[in-house]
Image (spheres, rainbow, N blue to C red):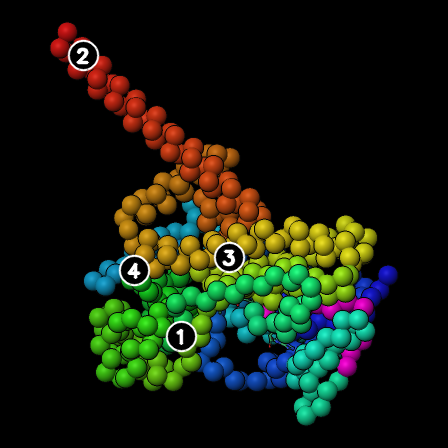
Amino acid sequence: MASRIVIVGGGLTGALAAVRLHEAGHAVSLHERREDPRRSTEHQGRSINLAFSTRGLDALDRVGLSETLREHGIPMRGRMLHGRDRSVTFQPYSADPANVLLSVSRDGLNAMLLDAVDERQIPTHFGQRLVDIELKASNAVFEVGQGRQSELFEVLIGADGAYSAVRNRLQRTDRFTYEQNYLEHGYKELTIPARADGSFAMEPHALHIWPRGGHMMIALPNPDGSFTCTLFWPFGGPVGFERVDTEREVNETFLDQFPDAVELMPHLTDEYLHHSTSSLVTIRCGPWFYEDRVVLLGDAAHAVVPFYGQGANAALEDVTIFIDLLAANDGAWGPTMASFYAQRKPDTDALADLALDNFVEMRDRVASPLFRLRVRAEQRVHRWAPRWITPLYEMVTFSRTPYVEAVARAKRQTALVERLMLALVALVLLVVVATIVLVVV
Ligand code: FAD
């Protein structure tokens, strides 16, 4: 039976949910706080590129958009590591060259999804900020200009991001648990422009990383030949946003930390001093639903730090899982919301941990020769015996294996490899001892 659904948030999750629920036969309306982003040029120094992979592509495939995204995205085959001595080393993401990340603009993807909403003539309301939900009356209250407007709903979807107003309202219901953790690091976006002839100033088919132990910079390619760089620095400390705040300090610090990048960044000091610095938060909460009427999807339910390149992929995968469960429950909202939360919450908790751990991997471990050797060995063994060993990165990024299962399998694999290595060492020792005994006797 068709329900009257109000979706709060016209970002990636809200727009995709609007299309999927409309196609499932429901009467959907989409309400977004901002003005239509397709007509606005306001960026505040943030243009966020996404490393996009299998989970997100699969979700887009279900609304016929994955091919369009592939055409727009730039394939990144691996990590390009930049040393302080200007050395560069390439590490492929997978032994299978078909497994690539796509560098895509978040705004571009959002526009593509909003166009898909328009094509289906789903009513959209920009400039409407949710300010309250009267839960008993199933009434959503929006601020519109100077006034307020109410919208009755049968089901309300909270897809309004990490600082969700819907979640904020659920926090005032009984036994709602909420936890937010900020990193000591923040981020700032900078640019490496295209060369004068429009070509890329660095290898375009890679995600560039300048790992520096306690901090790092990364760069993702854009179709216009430029790279969007993201600087992940602590707020405090000698190499930190609070200390480095003059033209001279910016130049000196960058020349010391990222000498090969500085030459390619003609607007460095201007961008550094004028672009905003943003914080990085992990949000865990629950339950993600209220009775059979309100549910949280995407970042509103589980914001993670960006270091596994999975936030948007997981947010879009939420929509796939939710719609599948709705079909499996014959359109019954209560059981769908409850089973969605029960199934998905452990996975996104696991993803939150993976994302935090990957920050250390990206800024530190990737630079170690031992790490590189292990990655190469894992990829090689995976190629020979894919049923025995699949690297964790591969399961998370290039499959839809639930995150919890991927982590558990990776742990089993590590234990197996360690046992094999021990057995190998024991065998070598045995051979050495046997040889000595034979020679002596
Ligand atoms: P959002 O994109 O936050 O959208 C929420 C929408 O709701 C917004 O349009 C907002 O304006 C609207 N809204 C908010 N409040 C209200 C209100 N009260 N009323 C009405 N509307 C409201 N993910 C990846 O998969 N790969 C990456 O490489 C990657 N890199 C990232 C890099 C950075 C620096 C950051 C910050 C994030 C990155 N992410 C990445 C994560 C990704 O951007 C998010 O997971 C994704 O945008 C979540 O989509 P969403 O629609 O749930 O939330």
In the displayed image of the protein, which residue is found farthest to the front?
174
Q: Which of marks 1 and 3 is nearer the N terminus?
A: 1
Q: Where is residue 75 in the image (x, y as percent from the top left)?
A: 46, 60
Secondary structure category for the residue under label 3: helix
Secondary structure category for the residue under label 1: strand
Give the residue type that dot 1 points to.
Answer: Lys
Give the residue type that dot 4 points to.
Answer: Gly
Residue in front for this viewpoint, 393 or 102: 393
Residue in front for this viewpoint, 372 or 287: 287
Q: Position of residue 105 (x, y in %)?
A: 51, 70
Report which residue position mark 2 lands on.
Answer: 437
- Specify whether 21 is left or right of 355: right
Report which residue position mark 1 lands on.
Answer: 188
Q: From which residue to which does the magenta span run?
A: 150-161
Give me the C-alpha separation between circle 3 and circle 4. 21 Å
Q: Earlier in the sequence, mark 2 or mark 4?
A: 4
Residue in front for this viewpoint, 20 or 143: 143
- Specify whether 435 is left or right of 237: left
Report if the CB atoms under discs 1 and 3 are less than 8 Å apart: no
Q: Earlier in the sequence, mark 1 or mark 4?
A: 1
Q: Which of marks 2 and 1 is nearer the N terminus?
A: 1
Marking on residue 213: 4
Give me the C-alpha separation between circle 1 and circle 3. 21 Å
Q: Residue at x 20, y 62 (%)?
A: 85
Give the residue type that dot 2 points to.
Answer: Val
Report which residue position mark 3 lands on.
Answer: 352
Does the rendering let one see residue 226?
A: no
Give me the C-alpha separation between circle 2 and circle 3. 54 Å
Q: Which residue is drawn at 45% across and 72% down?
A: 279
Secondary structure category for the residue under label 4: loop
